[in-house]
Amino acid sequence: MINPRSLVRALDKHWDVIEYLVALGRDHIAFDRDELLGVLNKVYPQDTEEQRLERLQQLVNNELLIAMSHSDSLQLNENVSQFVSSLLHEHELGLSDILKARIVDIQAGLEQLQQAMESRDMAALQNGALRIDKQLRQILQQLDQDSHAIQAIAERAKSSDERMPLDYRYREVLEAYDQYVQPMEELMDTGAGGNFYPLLERAETVLESVVQVLTIQGGLYSHQQMLRQVGFRVKDLRLNGRVALKQCTNTLMPLREEIRRHNHLSAAIGQLLGAVRKKGLDRTFPGQCLPVWRKERSLTIAVGSELLGLMEQVRGYQSKSVDFPEFTDDQLLVVLEQVDEDAIHRHFYRSLPIPDLMRWLIEYYGAFQDATLLKLYHKLIRLPDVNAMPNQESLRVTLKQIAIQLHSHVMESA
Amino acid sequence: MTIDLKQLSQLQALFRVLSSGAHINRLQDSELWLDLEKHYASYESLFSALGFALMLDGRGFAYFKTEQASSYTGKLTRRLALLLMLLFEYQADQGLHLFQFQQWRIDGLLLDKLCQHYHAMLEAEEMASAQALKETLDRAARVGFALFDDSSYWLLPAVHRYLDLFEELAQADKPELEQLVPEATETNDVDGEIQEDVV
């Protein structure tokens, strides 16, 4: 009797050699002692011979390896072998007939569900739901395993020696295609021929109607919950079935139709991709074996051009001398005058009416410059509250620097 | 050996490109390449004196060899390796000749197909979208593995570095499973049968 804990612990301790033996198990049924010692030698090269013998003994004691009947050869414990295989995605291609049998069982389960619903037998209802769920789960698992198995077949064909004759190399592929993919395609045909999808659809409607009846008539919440969960699984399978099959076809087609090009490189890539699928990218390319390149982020700090310009300016700096303007005797052309316009306006209003404005201005304000005088003249004739009438006779007046001829205005209060 | 620096007309440009980690490809960087080929011995000894190992491959690419990778290049090179493997696998399935990879037009359509076909494997590396693949290719283009032209990517000869590695790794991987037999035959006669089966 195997002690599960010690088995798991031993599996952990001797994982490397078990992984190796599972990979070898594809081509071998059992191993004899010397072969196993050879494998141990390869997997644990640092071990001494005694340690290897001890390790082999431990493998046998923990029942990871068990003796074959009628022979002294050792084989992997079948439980361990299956468990490790599924972890490493090493699967054998299943039989499409198994799927057919499961489909029949699901049909029986659906009938059981309907009958149980009619007779309100809740225990039978539960059993039926569990039965369907179990089959669905198994189908999902099988589809997953089969697609891995198909990929493995394709990878083996791809990575085999390119000088091998084609029919020999493709034997496995052709067999897989004829015995698995084609029957599966017939089974999963969404048209009239297939009975997989109609079954799933029926399962979905039956489950939904049962849930509905339970909701209306009342039933245990746990029962409804369970039926709903089975319904989810049906949906899951509807989605995944087609995808899995499509992937299988995509994988095998280029090989079957012999479109694929074969050479050393494609064989190598096929093999490595298989390793990536099973072990992941990091374990396939360990350490620093991939091409790398220098990526030196050399951090040099350089002085920017603006700063350089500034520095240059600082270095060649010469203080700028500003010459103050020298005192000049030249009189300003325009001499500023202080004009008290308000006083002039008051005087102007007092003097109204004025028969001749220009003469009046010259009389009282002749001291101002010509420009100021003329400005005053124009301001006064535009005042709003006086009437300005130009004189009929023109008049010539000589001011300080200029002489003007004008029709001087007569100013009256309005 | 005296090196006449005046003869090495492309010294500055070459050193700038190579020391940035990029690969020089014959057809794309023809000026640099010609000068490099012409004065290979001088360049090589000059660079090696500076501590750089210049590698020049007859298939048309040159680079500075280095062993250490930063975490950034380590991740990128792994992603690029996966992308190249999937691309070559896909093209082999289409019946294309693998060593004519420089003529493949790698456009959005092709990248989408890669995403669909190898979704599971790409997803495991968090690059299951055409956008992620484009980013990887963009980065590869920056160091001279690819070229972006005419709204598509084109692989450059430097990709041979990966292809060589793939073949080498596959070679190293293969005997591991079969080596058991010759070793075992030394000790046991019965295994002769097994050996025949395997070979």
Image (cartoon, rainbow, N blue to C red):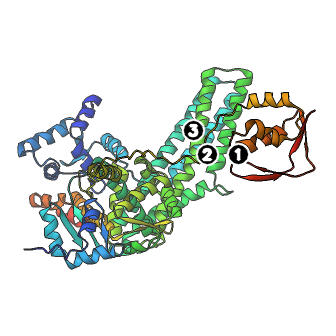
Of pointers 2 and 1, the one earlier in the residue sequence: 2
Amino acid type, label 3:
Arg
Task: Give the side of residue A294 with respect to residue A181, left or right.
Answer: left
Q: Which residue is mark 1?
A: A371
Q: Earlier in the sequence, mark 2 or mark 3?
A: 3
Q: Quadrant of the N terminus of chain B?
A: bottom left
Q: Position of residue A236 (x, y in %)?
A: 57, 42
Residue A124 numbered tag: none
Q: Is residue B172 left or right of residue B91?
A: left
In the image, what residue occupies the spot 24% across and 74% down?
B9
Q: Is residue A97 left or right of residue A382?
A: left
- The quarter holding residue A219 reads top right
**Closer to the camera, A287 or A369?**
A369
| Residue picked out by circle 2 | A334
Q: Where is residue A11? Give x, y as percent.
A: 25, 37
Q: Secondary structure at mark 3?
A: helix
Q: Is residue B147 above or below residue A27?
A: below
- Taking the spot 70% from the left edge, 45% from the top edge, the residue there is A371
Residue A77 pos. (x, y %): 28, 42
- Asked if labels 1 and 2 touch by Cβ distance under 8 angstroms, the answer is yes
Q: Amino acid at mark 1?
A: Ala
Whole-angstrom CA distance, mark 3 to mark 1, is 107 Å
